[in-house]
Amino acid sequence: MKIWLLLAAANGFLSVGLGAFGAHGLKGKVGEVELAAFETGAQYHMYHALALLAVAWLATLTHSMSVTIAGSAFITGILLFSGSLYVLGATGSRTLVLLTPLGGTAFLIGWLCLAVAARRID
């Protein structure tokens, strides 16, 4: 549980910091499309930082491998989905854009595994 709480806190912190950077540091320096991509990355980053709190909570209720897979999938999704959108938003570079749907798929896997783990609670 402790590792998931630490990861949730770290990612919550990062999503707020990066969101503020996007809102204040990038505004007027990048186009609207790039800024919107960056903001989307920050939003999904925060949603999944909160999802990691659910993973930590479920880890106290069950020792299901589904909990670990869910947390790992959320971290992977944050890195691939949000990370690729951060790069696109900050630089305009589309070099990592093919990673975005892979990150979205990781998010979906995480939510499915979270549901499986929840079903196993007595």
Image: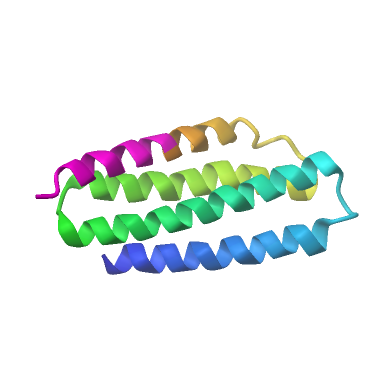
Count the numbered circles shown: 0
Residue found 90% across the figure and 54% down from its top: 28
Outermost residue toward the front?
122
On whether residue 1 falls in the magenta region, the answer is no
On whether residue 116 falls in the magenta region, the answer is yes
Q: Between 95 and 64, which is closer to the camera in this rendering?
A: 64
Q: Between 115 and 75, which is closer to the camera in this rendering?
A: 115
Q: Between 42 and 95, which is closer to the camera in this rendering?
A: 42
Residue found 21% across the figure and 44% down from its top: 117
Magenta segment, which residues?
Answer: 108-122
Residue 88 placement (x, y as % from top left): 72, 42
Q: Is residue 101 left or right of residue 114?
A: right
Residue 57 placement (x, y as % from top left): 27, 61
Magenta-colored segment: predominant secondary structure:
helix
* Image: 88 above or below 51: above
Q: Is residue 58 left or right of residue 81?
A: left
Residue 101 placement (x, y as % from top left): 55, 31
Residue 91 placement (x, y as % from top left): 78, 47
Residue found 29% across the figure and 44% down from its top: 114
Residue found 23% across the figure and 39% down from its top: 116
Q: Is residue 65 left or right of residue 89?
A: left
* Image: 119 above or below 59: above
The N terminus sits in image quarter: bottom left
